Amino acid sequence: MRIAKPFVITFIFCTFFSCTRQFQIARVVPGKTDINQVRQYLGEPNITPELASSSFNPHEEILIWEDVLVQLNKNENIVTAIHRQPASHEKSLQFWRQHFKGKVQKFQKVQTKFYAAEHIWQLDLPNLGVNVVYDESKDEVIKVVYYAVE
């Protein structure tokens, strides 16, 4: 029993800190969270705004961490989108289809030069501000994007 108690305490401690990062990322809400709150929740980015700006929209800049990318509106310093890797239970497209069953879902092939050779699809949930990028060749979700819904 004396051996089990430290093991259980260590397990709970490790579990708490491994889940904490996902909860910190979840606190960043597109359209509501500002740059100061992002830094408070996630710490300093690995790549700063001076080094990374959006090539798609000149009014946006990006902050990059090891596990998440955050897009910001330059004028308002408000988060417009969050890009992250899916958690282990989110890698199945079926998870997303079932989790948001009954919601408006748009499933379409991505047609860009960047993904030209790959079989990339996206599941967009426009009313919820969620976009899931699915790689058909790997049969798994490769990216989850949360964006501001207006």
Image (spheres, rainbow, N blue to C red):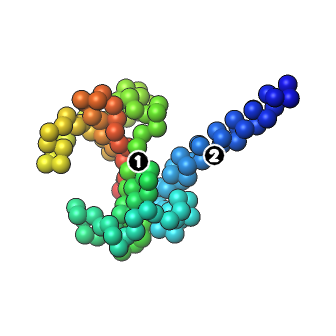
Task: Work out which residue is located at the far right of the displayed protein and give it.
Answer: 2
Image coordinates of residue 44 in percent, x first then y, are 50, 65
Q: Whole-percent x and y of residue 145? A: 37, 47
Q: Which residue lies under the disc numbered 1?
A: 84
Residue 113 left/right relative to 128: left
At label 1, counting other C-alpha atoms closer than 10 Å, the crowd grade (few under 14, some 14-19, many 20 or more) is some
Q: What x and y, as percent, mark residue 14?
A: 66, 41
Judging by the rendered image, the residue that carries numbered circle 2 is 17
Which residue is at the front of the view, 99 or 1? 1
Among the 4 quarters of the image, the one containing residue 61: bottom left
Q: Position of residue 128 (x, y in %)?
A: 39, 45
- Position of residue 87 relative to residue 112, above or below, is above
- Callout 1: SS: strand
User: In this view of the protein, can residue 47 be seen by the observer?
Assistant: yes
Of the residues tagged 1 and 2, which is closer to the observer? Answer: 2
Who's the residue at 34% across and 35% down the image?
A: 141
Q: What's the mark number on residue 64?
A: none
